[in-house]
Image (cartoon, helix red, strand yellow):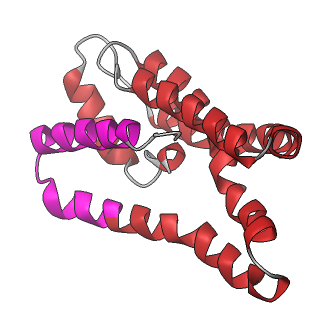
Amino acid sequence: MAQVTFVPIRSKVLFGYNCMQAGESVSDGQVDFINWQCIVVFLPMSTIQQYLAYKYGLRRSVVIGSVLQFFGLSIRCFIGLSWWCVIIGQLLVSMAWPFFLNVPGLVSVVWFPKSERILSTMFGSNIGWVGVLFGYFLSDLICQDKDEYTIFLDQMTKDDILNCDPS
């Protein structure tokens, strides 16, 4: 879900990043770019993910996605150095997106009988988004000023990295 981390919080990202940086500022267009980057990268990487999943198996495909996600989120942690860290990290996270988004359908085909596939795919595809929804609501409830928000973004990124366990 890290590929959409900045989508609903653009104004807060602009506020937090521009307050942290002395010489570099970020525009609306730059934040929009990292959001659109996910969509542009999704189609070609989805094709690659499908090929890898069928050729090497679902587990290896998920491990590749986890590695891409880990390195992308790790690079994004260096947001204080440059906005380029965010762009490069987001590119890697965007490349990892199909490795997770396409998995529920593949798991349904392998694990469930035909009569249960629609329901299992629906739950597998949507349950993560419910967690994202709660995360965004909580961020607005918890963070009242720029210092709290900076700490929250830092912790959210660390949590995303720690959840990239490929085993």
Q: Residue at x 20, y 28 (%)?
A: 19
Q: Residue at x 30, y 44 (%)?
A: 156
Specify the quadrant of the image occupied by residue 112. Answer: bottom right
Q: Is residue 156 magenta?
A: yes
Q: Is residue 116 above or below residue 26?
A: below
Q: Is residue 119 magenta?
A: no
| Relative image position of residue 106 (x, y in whole percent) | 77, 61
Observer-nearest of 27 and 109: 109
| Relative image position of residue 154 (x, y in whole percent) | 25, 35
Observer-nearest of 105 and 6: 105
| Relative image position of residue 126 (x, y in whole percent) | 57, 71
Predominant SS of the magenta segment: helix
Q: Residue lying farthest bottom?
A: 115
Q: Which residues are magenta?
A: 135-162
Q: In this image, 29 relative to 115: left or right?
A: left
User: How many numbered callouts?
Assistant: 0
Specify the quadrant of the image occupied by residue 125. Answer: bottom right
Observer-nearest of 12 and 76: 76
Q: Is residue 58 above or below residue 139?
A: above
Observer-nearest of 22 and 128: 128
Q: Is residue 143 above or below residue 122?
A: above
Specify the quadrant of the image occupied by residue 146. Answer: top left
| Relative image position of residue 48 (x, y in whole percent) | 83, 37
Q: Residue at x 45, y 25 (%)?
A: 86
Q: In this image, 52 relative to 133: left or right?
A: right
Q: Residue at x 79, y 65 (%)?
A: 110
Q: In this image, 102 relative to 91: left or right?
A: right
